[in-house]
Image (cartoon, rainbow, N blue to C red):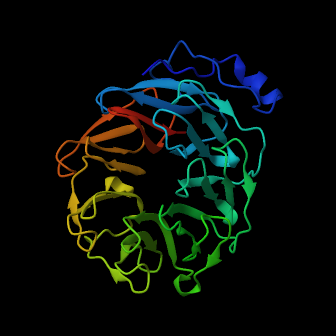
Amino acid sequence: MKKLNLIVSYCFIFLIIVSFSNGCKKDDNPITPGTNTDGVSTLIYSSDMGLTWTVYKLYLTDAIKRIATFNQLANSSVICSGTKGTIIRSTDGGSNWAFDSSAVTKNDLNDMSSVGTNLSGVAVGNSGTIIKTDNDGVNWVTITSPTTNNLYSVRFIAIPGIGFAVGSNGTVITSTDRGNSWSLLSSFQSSFVTYRKIELLNPLNFLFAGDSSNVNRPFIIKTSDGGTTWQSAVIPSLQGVKLFGMDFRGLDTGIAVGSNGTIIKTVDGGLNWTLKQSGLNEDIKAILFNMEICIAVGNKHTLLSFDNGDTWSFQLINNANGPFHCIFRIDQGEYFVAGD
């Protein structure tokens, strides 16, 4: 992986003046260990499955919440989204970055998903924000939302292009036309419930992870018939925990992560979960689980498992500016992690 070309420090004032309309420039010096510069987002890169990381500066005033791609060609476009509507885009696998100057929204963008057709994707965020691109993130349009509640997760089933987004106050919305229009599923609504993560395994099997304020603990629900009926998963007693991330390798084996260092695992498609020891007592925000590795990220920590999530090791990234929020696989052995 060629060295990232990111912004040097003197670009920060200039970028504000031009409203982030220019591309990023090469940063020859990763952040000095021990620094914590306000207004700098962290992007780290590994070429060895997360064993070692290089830290780079992104002179943003905002946190990166999600990294995704809408392009079916490997090593092509990568898009980051985050707070205050921040969107940055790379067309060469992450070597060079440019800021989106269209400012479609100023609301926080919490998640993105491909809609199942090449170059098309949807981002969702606070206050019911939904935006969509059909040209690989070059342009975005605002989609009419059926809710003003915060939306935290969005996923699409590539075929037939059905999507779901979930969020606060028990909000679940769905699209049957690849994100062009959305409707509210009122049967899920509850002032006590926040849905934080969706995992779509196939058109029939998918899961929602959330938490309920009236009992102060998380839950996972699963459908095996495309959403007609739902079953509550059996999870460990996790008082006060919120689940932020979930990922499956295949239909049966999955990992979910959350606050207080929580890691839970299922081997039966999400119906039963067991607690695993992370060794940390901090929020773990995201998990990526594939045939290579399990990688999770938290507050300046990366966590690795080489035995399908049963045991974990972790390392502190001292020169990160703040908590990590997301993970993205570039290519074999190559990963990005981003955050504050």
Task: Write the residue at 65% across / 70% down.
Answer: 149
The reply to whether residue 282 is visible in this rendering is no
Q: Position of residue 194 (x, y in %)?
A: 51, 71
Furthest residue toward right: 17
Where 264 sits versus 120, above or below?
below
Q: Quadrant of the N terminus?
A: top left
Q: Position of residue 171 (x, y in %)?
A: 57, 75
Task: Write the residue at 44% across / 80% down.
Answer: 227
Furthest residue toward top: 28
Q: Position of residue 228 (x, y in %)?
A: 43, 86
Q: Position of residue 42 (x, y in %)?
A: 52, 32
Task: Write the residue at 71% across / 24% down.
Answer: 12
**Quadrant in which residue 71 is drawn:** top right
Give the camera-side residue of 67 and 210.
67
Q: Position of 116 compared to 10: left or right?
A: left
Give the camera-side residue of 2 and 57.
2
The reply to whether residue 187 is visible in this rendering is yes
Task: Write the residue at 57% across / 73% down.
Answer: 174
Q: Position of 248 compared to 62: left or right?
A: left
How many numbered discs? 0
Where 283 sits versus 32, above or below?
below
**Quadrant in which residue 206 is drawn:** bottom left
**Quadrant in which residue 250 is drawn:** bottom left
Q: Position of 271 compared to 194: left or right?
A: left
